[in-house]
Amino acid sequence: MSPAHTYTQRRKRLADRLTNGLILLPGNGEAPRNYRGNAYPFRQDSTFRYFAGLNRPDLVLTIDAETGESLLYGDEATLDDTIWMGEQPSLAELARQAGLQLGGSLQDAINATGMAEVVHYLPAYRAERRELLERCVDHFNRPSEELIRAVISLRLHKSAEEIAEMDRAVQISMEMHRAARAGAKPGMREAEVAGILEGLAIGAGGRLAYSAIVSRDGHILHNHAHSNVLREGDLLLIDAGAETDTGYAGDITRTFAVGAEMTEKQRAVYDIVDGAKRRVIEEIKPRVPYRELHDLSARLIVDGLKELELMKGSTEDAVAAGAHALFYPHGLGHMIGLDVHDMEDLGEDLVGYDAEFRRSEQFGTRNLRLGRRLEEGFTITVEPGIYFIPILTDRWRAEGKHTEFVNYDAVAAYRDFGGIRLEDNVVVTADNCRTLGSV
């Protein structure tokens, strides 16, 4: 973890953003796979870790918004814990590491506020969190918007220390992708390639930041099934990222042909996606709305598909109508940090949008997780793609949808093509941006 003063300063800045009350930030507990003693790998709550730095289950942090007093609550390790898991640091040692004081009874601390309305807490995404809030707080289903906005305002801008961790996460992620590409051979199952990725993530001291996508059916956007056998020349789409031991995530996507060079047809589509990714990264800088960069990527993709005679007509009109979403039905990217979709548990629109930029309701563009103006210190993904999705193509063609922009007869020849997505992670700098992992 970082030095104690890092967390002390973060908690002070958080308290300064709230007018009064008690800030309640529970950490996560263990999540049983099928019984209590057989748990999934432990994953700490990101906001708790951001303000306390501690990666142990069943801890709770409180911050007095008026005084800044920060207290740590939890149970000491038992003799059984020590027997099964070895020596554990005491609560006092954990508190010292994070610059905290030890609390007594959590319920007493909450009661001391005098009214439940001044207890600030975040939305609960796990059942045990809801149970804790129900025990401790009246109106437990009313998360504090004031706290949500304060946390987002702090976590949006990454410090130099955080960016260094992001660089490390992306470097590990790239090593995973290089090994997977070298190891993928005709006759292998997708699962074997997924094993290469996960083994390297664990070997680097962390884990996967999310369930890896390893698929020759790249047109299925979040395909976590790994049962296909790879054939020579298959396009294999791999979307995988490492999470470091400090909790920061990488999120990288690459697509390549298994055991062969790409065909001319594959390369033509790949070059459109690669060109869109590179052009967008060139345009990233503070004050640029990410929604405009998404629209730029859509226009570049339409222009490329027009050269392949898969689309036609006005590029501007096609994008405005949403015709591009037949091939590109997701957003250009999202925030990334301690979460692969950073702070999504706090409300995606509060993180990625604001009063100036609201989420679109248009098919495809409504999946854009980030639309607001970029600021120095934002860490984001850039991930354009082109997909040939038979069920979507068949439906749109049957409905006569966007026939002025889509050449359905030509698209039919790509029915078994799959999909191509390419993704990098970047940090917005004072003047432009830098691709993470490039140091």
Image (tube, rainbow, N blue to C red):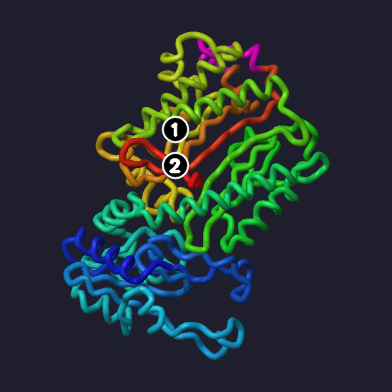
334 versus 26 height, above or below: above
Quick one: which residue is furthest to the bottom in this view?
79
- Contact check, label 2 and label 1, Cβ < 8 Å: yes
**Which residue is labeled 1 in the image?**
281
Is residue 359 something one can see in this rendering? no
Give the magenta-colored segment's residue range. 399-411
Residue 410 image point, x, y percent: 65, 13
**Which residue is labeled 2 in the image?**
426
Is 50 on the left-hand or right-hand side of 20? right
* Three-letter amino acid code of the residue under disc 2: Val
Q: Nearer the viewer, residue 355 or 119?
A: 355
Residue 254 image point, x, y percent: 61, 38
Query: Number of callouts in the render?
Result: 2
Quadrant assignment, res 64: bottom left
Q: Give SS at disc 1.
A: helix
110 versus 398 height, above or below: below
Q: Nearer the viewer, residue 40 or 153?
A: 153
* Three-letter amino acid code of the residue under disc 1: Ile
Residue 187 image point, x, y percent: 83, 42
Of the residues under marks 2 and 1, which one precedes in the sequence? 1
Instruction: Name the main secondary structure of what is drawn in magenta.
Output: loop
Is 39 on the left-hand or right-hand side of 140? right
